[in-house]
Image: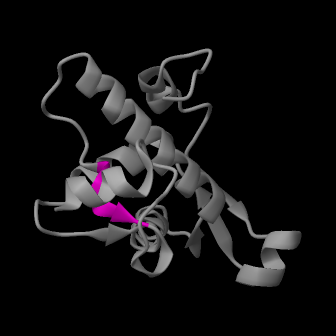
Amino acid sequence: MPKTAHSWQQKLYDAKGLPKVEEIKGNMSRKWGSGTVVIPAPIEVDQLMRKVPKGKLITINEIRQALATKHNATIGCPMTTGIFAWVVAYAAEEQKQQGATDITPYWRTLKVKGMINEKYPGGVNAQKALLE
């Protein structure tokens, strides 16, 4: 597990003034057009990932869409949503190492187009094993 100054659980609960909705501008507007983008709080990403039932999967794009809908935004931020999914995964593994059994099933969240996330704890093989 990557070393950090704060625990992964601290990062999960550190909202840093998020969520916030902003106008899409700059480089982002070239790809996403006009409208608004929601920058979610990490715990919001966790809450959505936690809801995925056994035997089901969700993609990061579906999480982004759910966040956009929740906040009446045009899109969910692709960068922060992906980063926060990574934080959720490491926070869950940290909880597991501390003996918790009710952790967020982060392995049920796939990347765009349903791809396995190599940045999750243990990499591709660990996520495949958890999905099986």
In the rendered view, would you say 73 is above or below 12? below
In the image, residue 103 lies at what x, y percent?
21, 36
The x and y percentages for residue 47 are 31, 47
Relative to 62, 107 lies left or right:
left
Residue located 61% across and 52% down the image: 80
* Residue drawn 89% across the image and 69% down it: 26
- Lateral position of residue 62 relative to residue 103, left or right: right
Q: Is residue 107 magenta?
A: yes
Q: Is residue 126 left or right of residue 103?
A: right
Q: Is residue 50 left or right of residue 10?
A: left
Tell me the quarter of the picture where residue 63 sits: bottom left
Give the residue furthest to the right. Answer: 26
Q: Quadrant of residue 57?
A: bottom left
Is residue 89 visible to us here?
Answer: yes
Q: Position of residue 24 (x, y in %)?
A: 75, 70
The percent position of residue 114, horizontal first and vertical second, equals 39, 77
Residue at (61, 31) in percent of width and height: 16
Badge count: 0
Classify 129 as above or below 60: above
Which of the image's four quarters has the C terminus? bottom left
Can residue 48 be seen?
no
Does residue 99 sit above or below 36 in this rendering? above
Magenta stretch bounds: 106-110
Task: Establish if 76 lies above or below 124.
Answer: below
Residue in the foreground of this view, choosing between 125 and 59 = 125
User: Quarter of the image holding residue 13?
Assistant: top left
Q: Main secondary structure of the magenta part?
A: helix
> What colour scheme governs how the chains and residues are painted in the rendered image of this protein?
one colour
